[in-house]
Image: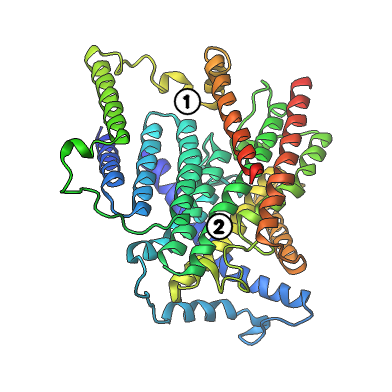
Amino acid sequence: MDWINLILIPAIKSVILVVVLLTGFAYLTWVERKLIGRFQQRIGPNRAWKFGLGHPIADALKMIFKEETIPNYTDKILFALGPGLALAPSLLIFAVIPVGPTLRMFGKDIPFVVADVNIGLLWVLAVGGIGTYGTVLGGWASNNKYSLLGALRTSAQMLSYELPMGILIIALLLTTALGTADGSGTLNLVEIVRMDRPWWLWAWIWLAFPLYFICMLAETGRKPFDFPETENELVAGYQTEYGSIKFALYYMTEYLHVLGASGVAVSVFFGGWRGPFVEQFPGLGLLYFTIKLLAMVFLFIWASASVPRPRYDQLLKFCWTFLFPAALIYMAITAVGVVLL
Amino acid sequence: MFLFIVFALIAIVAGLGVILSRKPVYSALFLLVNFATLAALYIMLQAQFLAAVQIIVYAGAIVVLILFVIMLIGGGELRDIRDPNKTLLRRLTAPRVTGAVLALLLLAAIGYGLITGTLNSASGSAAAFNNGSVQAIASVLYTDYVLPFELASVLLLVGMIGAVVLAKNE
């Protein structure tokens, strides 16, 4: 009985989550290409099947069946390790994100989250921090100037933007102290989503969202902050030497990061799976979560289509001279507010 | 106990890997493995928060920084530093002597703690400490240990200001 609860159910949930995420990734590429096409007044992919819906499948097959080459003069172990090290953490982030309320199925209460742990948000930060290694090591192991530059940029960019992001998250965690009965906050994403907050608190939380969104763009390495790969400066950055399925793994990582970051943002800023009538029909929670997630992903694609890329030094300067102090001020005001209220 | 032995062995092997690898990048990666196993040991002690912080701070930031520096100065293979022409006494440079003395002191302290039994007492275990929850750690940190805590934060602040001053002078 115990092993069903401890191992079997989480394992089934993980498998479902991974399958959904990987399918989601495949169709996210389709969504992005379609949307970017529209933004640039093109039609976008429309050859394979209706609306080009067959493109992701064709892409996947092509990637898998391409010849896999490992160039000479690379560090073979790390070269092979890189994509895997990048992909695994990007999947792990979703373990603590509640995608729906607790549902009653097969005579059991099944919460729609893989790991309901009390360090929820810290898990996100920890796993996000480890995600850097895949990129950095892959870039270094390629033994290519462009790859190395991409890797260096990645490590500096991730380290810098983790700071304002972490501080904003601290501020948001401080606000959770106002939501619980005994006045002690929580790190648990499941509880954060469940929390009832007054409208002024929501307004104050949403005030931090633009800053947080900029951090997310930089942390996921998405356009306009795609400095790890900047195709018109560094060929393809850290993934220059990668081909076939290894390249596909890096590609996957990028989109999974977008999904993961969106999931966290939706849970922290927009109430996760909550919405009207979700108390009566818990199944609606999944739908709400998906809609909110897609809206967040749309924001990502919108930003990548409409904002030009800054210079690399401008990126770091912006982080240290504006974003970081702004986040600190936001946190200080939040702290004072939480103590006074 | 079985899990502990597995993780402890991995930690020791990784620790040896740090000092025995010829390539600095591999050393940094072994260090990362070592930190990860430490986090696993914390989790086995029910100290989830400590484990998460261990990963965030050490794996997520410090080793990335180390890798960054290694890559900036070029992470090529190290030359063999054992110079057969020098006598043993000549090879004892100041950093090596300091390192050896500190290592011996640490070993002596741990040995003393184990022999007198002050290190393996169960009263301070994390499970007795409200599962190492954030609330429990915070309440102890801000009451019993507030002075060391504040001193450490002042130290970090000084480091931060120092970095800014160094960067400004260029």
Tell me, yes or no, whether dots 1 and 2 are on the same chain. no
Cα–Cα gap, marks 1 and 2:
33 Å
Q: Is residue A335 above or below residue A287?
A: above
Please, what is the three-letter code of the amino acid marked with disc 1?
A: Gly
**Residue located at (59% from left, 29% from top):** B158
Residue A143 rendering spot, x and y as whole percentages: 41, 68
User: Which one is nearer the viewer's eye here, A11 or A224?
Assistant: A224
Q: Mark 2 packing: few (<14 Cα in 10 Å), some, or many (20+)?
A: many
The color scheme shown is rainbow
Which quadrant is home to the C terminus of chain A? top right
| Residue for point 20% across, 49% down | B83
Query: Residue under mark 1: which chain is it in?
Result: B
- Residue A316 in the image, given as x and y percentages of width and height: 66, 52
Residue A189: x percent and y percent? 61, 40
Does the CB distance between marks 1 and 2 fall below 8 Å?
no
Q: Which mark is residue B132?
A: 1
Residue A240 place in picture, x, y as percent = 50, 72
Question: At 49% across and 60% down in the image, what residue appears?
Answer: A135
* Left or right: where B98 falls relative to B131: left
Q: Residue at x 37, y 65 (%)?
A: A80
Task: Using the rendered image of the protein, determine whether residue A1 is visible from the camera's viewpoint.
Answer: no
Q: Which mark is residue A154?
A: 2
The amino acid pointed to by label 2 is: Thr
| The N terminus of chain A lies in quadrant | top left
Query: Secondary structure beneath disc 2?
Result: helix
Secondary structure of the residue carrying numbered label 1: helix
